[in-house]
Amino acid sequence: MEEKTSIAAKLNWLRAGVLGANDGIISTAGVVMGVAATGAALGEIATAGMAAVTAGAVSMALGEYVSVSAQRDTERAMISQHAEEVRDTPDDLEADIVSTLEKRGLNPETARVAAQELAAGDLLHAHLMVHHNVDSKELTNPWAAALSSAVAFLLGSIFPLVAVVVAPAGSRGLVTLIATVVALCVTGGISAMLSEGSTARSVTRLVVGGALAMAITYGLGYLFGEVAL
């Protein structure tokens, strides 16, 4: 059971990383395309892109830290509450484990034996794992979540930022678009693999969404300056 929980936790971290990378790809591509559409020089485009990357990474990290910290506080409060129940009514907690295992398909006798074995080791840990899917021995780490989210955003933003910087002046828009689409295809494929869903559907959603974001920011940039692509 703990092994399955650990695998699920790792998959959740990976999914969060993919989402962070998608945010980095799309938001950075949108910013550099919008600024480039105003007729800005390469230095100005790069500066705007770096500012967007920095702000985005900090925002992602802060948001993830706050979210995971709240989750960790909730888990700690739950552990404290259940620790009191273990001390006062241990039989009730074991009965809860039996009931939960029966709902998951075990017959009453097997559920009772399994609950006794789990409770014999660490009743608090067993009840939290079975009844609430909370690992009391390995709580979520808000600092790790914040760092991984920021790194994922930075990695995603590299593709459009590098593309717009290295591309020739006359084809910055096209090169940035291609780099962004390729990056979104990769993250879309990874998302489909993790969710065991349709790769074509996942990639299409991301590419269409990314293209729409770039079109909107490019259009807004065009309204405020002459096209430089």
Image (tube, helix red, strand yellow):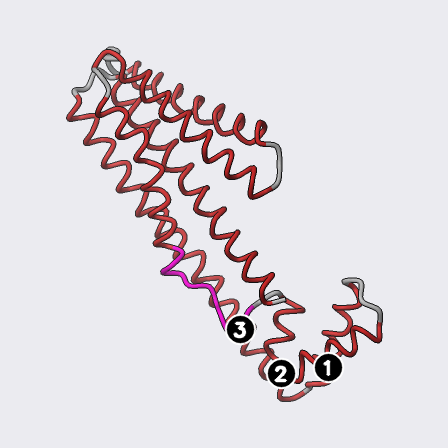
Q: Decide: few, some or many residues near mark 1? Use Cα within 10 Å; few <14, some 14-19, many ≥20.
A: some
Q: Residue 208: which numbered mark, if any?
A: none
Sequence-earlier tag: 3 or 1: 1
Query: Is 84 drawn above or below residue 110 in the view shown?
Result: below
Q: Quadrant of the N terminus?
A: bottom right
The span picked out in magenta is 135-145
Horizontal side of residue 206 vs 170, given as left or right:
right
Identify which amino acid the numbered label 2 is placed on.
Gly
Q: Which residue does the numbered mark 3 point to in the structure image?
A: 136
Q: Residue 116: which numbered mark, if any?
A: 1
Front-most of residues 72 and 148? 148
x, y (%) of residue 118? 67, 78
Q: How much space separates mark 3 and mark 1, taking CA atoms?
A: 19 Å
What residue is shown at x 43% (from left), y 62% (from top)? Answer: 69
What residue is shown at x 19% (from left), y 31% (from top)? Answer: 47
Sequence-earlier tag: 2 or 1: 1
What residue is shown at x 37% (from left), y 54% (from top)? Answer: 146
x, y (%) of residue 114? 74, 76
Sequence-earlier tag: 2 or 3: 2
The reply to whether dot 3 and dot 1 touch (C-beta < 8 Å) is no
Q: How much space separates mark 2 and mark 3, taking CA atoms?
A: 13 Å
x, y (%) of residue 90? 68, 85
Front-most of residues 217 and 2? 2
Determine the secondary structure under disc 3: loop
